[in-house]
Amino acid sequence: MVLSKDLLEILVCPQCKGEIVPDDNHDKLLCHACKLAYPVRDGIPVMLVDEALPFSRTPAQTAADRATR
């Protein structure tokens, strides 16, 4: 399920208050600053640090992030 653009604009990472973005499958919200993935369950983002899982960026993703800055 795709989250609404309005909801994504107001949600922030609860740990660092930084930007979050959906992953390709829209089943996680990613904070690149904290390297945490927050789950989306039944279309509802679970924005609890205790529920977040760490993730790592591939070198290609990191390069793409730098190119867009």
Image (cartoon, rainbow, N blue to C red):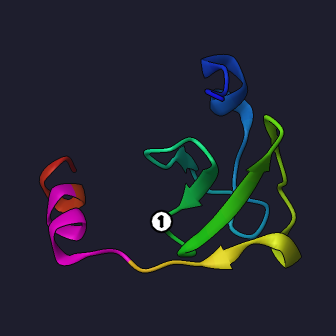
Task: Quickly name the residue at label 1.
Answer: 32
Name the dominant secondary structure of the magenta segment. helix
**Amino acid marked by disc 1:** His
Q: Secondary structure at mark 1?
A: loop
Residue 8: image location, x then y, percent: 65, 32
**Residue depicted at x 66% and y 27%:** 3
**Residue depicted at x 72% and y 32%:** 10
Above/below status of 7 relative to 62: above
Magenta residues, start to end:
57-64
Residue 59 covered by magenta stretch: yes
Which quadrant of the figure contains the N terminus?
top right
In depth, the one of 23 and 35 nearer the eye is 23
Above/below status of 38 relative to 4: below
**Residue depicted at x 18% and y 61%:** 66
Above/below status of 9 relative to 22: above
Residue 39: image location, x then y, percent: 73, 57
Residue 21: image location, x then y, percent: 52, 46
In depth, the one of 56 and 42 nearer the eye is 42
Rendering quarter of residue 54? bottom right
